[in-house]
């Protein structure tokens, strides 16, 4: 299988992470990519270096003002007296403020609060370059899928929590969504995005909410007890023209292989009925039993079976890396998933 990476991912090494009132080391670290590279090497796959995406590429789905924020935030922040090393939001406009005409000042603190959904997307001086490199990997995989092939994109940072104009949950630009849009732009009439990360792909849902040409499906830990907390419910089916083209499959905490693969089969059935020309897989490994939070308990065998089940759709696919934080296990899980994919094909 073809694979794409870009070493600039390592320029993004976030440190800040706030969990239940405690500041902890951030776990979306460059070692994740090292582990994934080792997984590719195990299969004898040499990843090609993808060109970084341009701001214009990202503007296919993201607002220019938001992209300018991502580009300039770290420098503006560093110039603040007494600023910490990373851009971290500490106040967001509330729904009441927005309803009463809240405005956006140029001040870096206000900009961060406006464009960031939470504190889990800190930005340092190298973040923007890494974000463009991750998006470039997804677009390179999409170009392959547009030619009828399947490719894996080692995207870091991940992207599926990023909205058109909002960062959140370790995500800045939505790599999987950009891959889907690129496939549309290259002639695919319908594209399905299948998100098997353990967290709801809320950004992807938001971006394609009112569109009927991109089917978004996400299977994830029940948001009543898990990030992103407020959305990811089965009742969210899209809006306007997009009504019926978003599907969420929330799973009880602790769900293992059997329940997870049953949800996958239900999602695959929806994909088949949609009859897409191409597929984007938002591939997270944080449903693994080895995850620090262990919301779900999927085994390596489960991921291998998932790879086989998805590949039997016989669709050209851009497989975009999302989450997964059990660094010691990531490479092995990727190897099992891709081996399962090959066995299914
Ligand atoms: Zn996740």
Image (cartoon, rainbow, N blue to C red):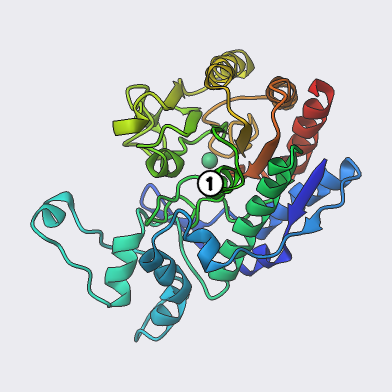
Q: Residue at x 67, y 59 (%)?
A: 30
Question: Where 259 sits versus 77, above or below?
Answer: above
Relative placement, left or right, of 15 versus 308 is: left
Up-down relation of residue 234 to residue 91 (above or below): above
Q: Quadrant of residue 236?
A: top left
Q: Position of residue 50 (x, y in %)?
A: 73, 60
Percent position of residue 250, x then y: 44, 23
Q: Is residue 171 left or right of residue 157?
A: left
Relative horizontal placement of residue 1, taking residue 257 as reference (left or right): right
Q: Seen from this angle, which residue lies furthest left?
A: 100
Q: Which residue is mark 1?
A: 181
Quarter occupied by the N terminus: top right
Of the pair 314 and 165, the residue shown nearer to us: 314
Task: Tell me if residue 160 can be seen.
Answer: yes
Does the beta carbon at disc 1 come under 8 Å from ligand 1? no
Left or right of 233? Residue 279 is: right
Q: Residue at x 67, y 55 (%)?
A: 137
x, y (%) of residue 98? 15, 55
Give whichever of 104, 28 is nearer the camera.
104
* Residue density around tag 1, few if under 14, some if 14–19, many if 20 or more, within 10 Å: many
- Residue at 60 percent across and 57 percent down: it is 135
Q: Residue 302: where, in percent of width, then height?
A: 69, 22
Q: Work out whether residue 29 can be spotted.
A: no
**For the view shown, which residue lies furthest in the right direction?**
44
């Amino acid at each position: 299988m073809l694979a794409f990476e870009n070493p600039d991912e390592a320029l993004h090494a976030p440190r800040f992470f706030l969990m239940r009132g405690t500041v902890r080391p951030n776990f979306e670290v460059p070692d994740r990519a090292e582990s994934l590279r080792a997984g590719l090497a195990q299969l004898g796959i040499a990843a090609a270096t993808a060109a970084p995406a341009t701001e214009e590429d990202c503007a296919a789905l993201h607002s220019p003002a938001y992209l300018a924020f991502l580009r300039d935030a770290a420098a503006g922040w560093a110039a603040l007296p007494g600023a910490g090393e990373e851009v971290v939001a500490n106040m967001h406009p509330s729904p009441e403020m927005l309803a009463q005409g809240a405005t956006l000042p140029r001040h870096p603190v206000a900009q961060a609060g406006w464009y960031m959904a939470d504190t889990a997307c800190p930005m340092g001086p190298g973040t923007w370059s890494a974000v463009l490199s991750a998006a470039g990997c997804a677009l390179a995989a999409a170009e392959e899928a547009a030619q009828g092939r399947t490719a894996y994109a080692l995207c870091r940072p991940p992207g599926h929590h990023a909205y058109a104009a909002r960062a959140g949950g370790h995500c800045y630009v939505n790599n999987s969504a950009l891959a889907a849009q690129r496939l549309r732009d290259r002639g695919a009439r319908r594209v399905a995005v299948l998100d098997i990360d353990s967290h709801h792909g809320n950004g992807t849902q938001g971006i394609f909410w009112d569109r009927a040409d991109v089917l978004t499906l996400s299977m994830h830990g029940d948001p009543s007890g898990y990030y992103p907390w407020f959305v990811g419910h089965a009742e969210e089916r899209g809006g306007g023209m997009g009504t019926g083209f978003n599907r969420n499959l929330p799973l009880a905490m602790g769900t293992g292989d059997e329940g997870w693969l049953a949800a996958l089969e239900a999602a695959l059935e929806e994909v088949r009925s949609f009859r897409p020309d191409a597929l984007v897989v938002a591939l997270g490994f944080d449903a693994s039993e080895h995850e620090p939070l262990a919301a779900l308990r999927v085994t390596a065998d489960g991921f291998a079976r998932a790879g086989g089940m998805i590949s039997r759709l016989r669709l050209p696919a851009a497989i975009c890396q999302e989450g997964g934080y059990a660094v010691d296990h990531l490479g092995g899980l990727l190897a099992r998933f891709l081996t399962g994919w090959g066995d299914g094909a």
